[in-house]
Image (spheres, helix red, strand yellow):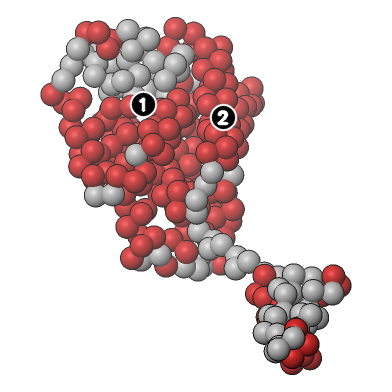
């Protein structure tokens, strides 16, 4: 039988990549109008799926408010210190257990919340470039704190305070973010280690950032990696557990009265950098008016 007598197999319609390109028409063998209509329908469905808006990310207002609690508490502590430093009140911030325990609680809350924040960022697949941009802000502010404290305290300037510690710990926590349950164990070891290991090698200004010191350095703020990274590791581990099992603890609604706290918590670094100059200015103004 000649070619004219053969039945050629029907060709499938081409993929409908763009209606205006004419790719929805039937093939040369003639899948017919119904094939073209089916192609149009499929393309329309795909288009609706691809152009649907991306679901908004959760708002972590409760986490932001908790961060605000830490920085407001810290500001109250610093204001009390400023009053004592300028002789308006008489308080011993270097020996009084009341103030020493408060400092420990404030730093612990600050670092635990930082760990929670890292759990959220890691859970949202934060890229390394974005991580480094945020890290650069923290590290840059740490340098400014060192400069400002040197102008104010000279030899007791802050060479490894809370921001310096956070800058180092953020990197370590990010690198170990997949540690799972081991983060709890690592945190416990980090917290316990300085109680058992003390080496003179770590007493110098170049090495005391590790934390295995024999005596506390003369500085106005000191937050070494050990034991404090243990608190941030626990915050990371707790945050990952909450996001997996009790997400609403962090994403649930806040009472309207606490909304300003959530806003403040989202600007915690700016608040941290500005609060002391403002508070010291107020104290100096009070001294001028006395």
What residue sits right under mark 2 in the picture?
Answer: 136
Q: Residue 55, relative to residue 75: is it above or below?
A: below
Residue at horizontal 19 percent and vertical 35 percent from the top? 189
Q: Which element is circle 2 on?
A: helix
Q: Residue 254, relative to residue 102: is it above or below?
A: below
Q: Which element is circle 1 on?
A: loop
**Is 18 on the left or on the right of 209, as rendered?**
right
Q: Position of residue 163 (x, y in %)?
A: 47, 29
Mark nearest the camera among 2 and 1 is 2
* Lower sequence index among marks 2 and 1: 2
What residue sits right under mark 1 in the picture?
Answer: 223
Q: Position of residue 160 (x, y in %)?
A: 42, 20
Q: Would residue 104 be seen by someone viewing this image from the given angle? A: no
The residue furthest front is: 1
Q: Residue 279, relative to residue 4: is it above or below?
A: above
Q: Position of residue 178 (x, y in %)?
A: 34, 46
Give the quadrant of the C terminus.
Answer: top right
């Amino acid at each position: 039988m000649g070619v004219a007598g053969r039945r050629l197999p029907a060709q499938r319609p081409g993929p409908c990549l763009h209606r205006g390109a004419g790719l929805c028409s039937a093939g040369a063998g003639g899948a017919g109008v119904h094939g073209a209509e089916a192609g149009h329908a499929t393309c329309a469905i795909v288009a609706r799926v691809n152009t649907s808006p991306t679901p908004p990310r959760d708002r972590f207002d409760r986490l932001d408010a908790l961060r605000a609690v830490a920085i407001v508490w810290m500001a109250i502590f610093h204001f009390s210190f400023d009053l004592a430093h300028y002789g308006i009140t008489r308080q011993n911030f270097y020996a009084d257990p009341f103030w020493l325990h408060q400092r420990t609680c404030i730093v612990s809350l600050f670092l635990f919340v930082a760990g929670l924040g890292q759990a959220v960022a890691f859970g949202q697949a934060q890229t390394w470039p974005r991580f480094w941009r945020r890290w650069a802000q923290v590290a840059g502010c740490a340098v400014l704190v060192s400069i400002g404290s040197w102008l104010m305290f000279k030899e007791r300037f802050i060479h490894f305070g809370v921001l310096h510690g956070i800058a180092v710990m953020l990197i370590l926590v990010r690198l170990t973010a997949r540690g799972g349950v081991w983060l709890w164990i690592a945190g416990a070891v980090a917290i316990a280690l300085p109680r058992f290991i003390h080496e003179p090698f770590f007493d110098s200004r170049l090495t005391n950032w590790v934390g295995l010191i024999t005596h506390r350095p003369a500085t106005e703020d000191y937050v070494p990696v050990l034991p404090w990274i243990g608190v941030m590791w626990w915050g990371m581990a707790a945050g990952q557990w909450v996001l997996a099992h009790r997400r609403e603890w962090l994403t649930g609604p806040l009472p309207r009265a606490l909304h300003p706290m959530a806003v403040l918590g989202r600007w915690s670094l700016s608040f941290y950098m500005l609060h002391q100059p403002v508070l010291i200015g107020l104290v100096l103004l009070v001294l001028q008016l006395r």
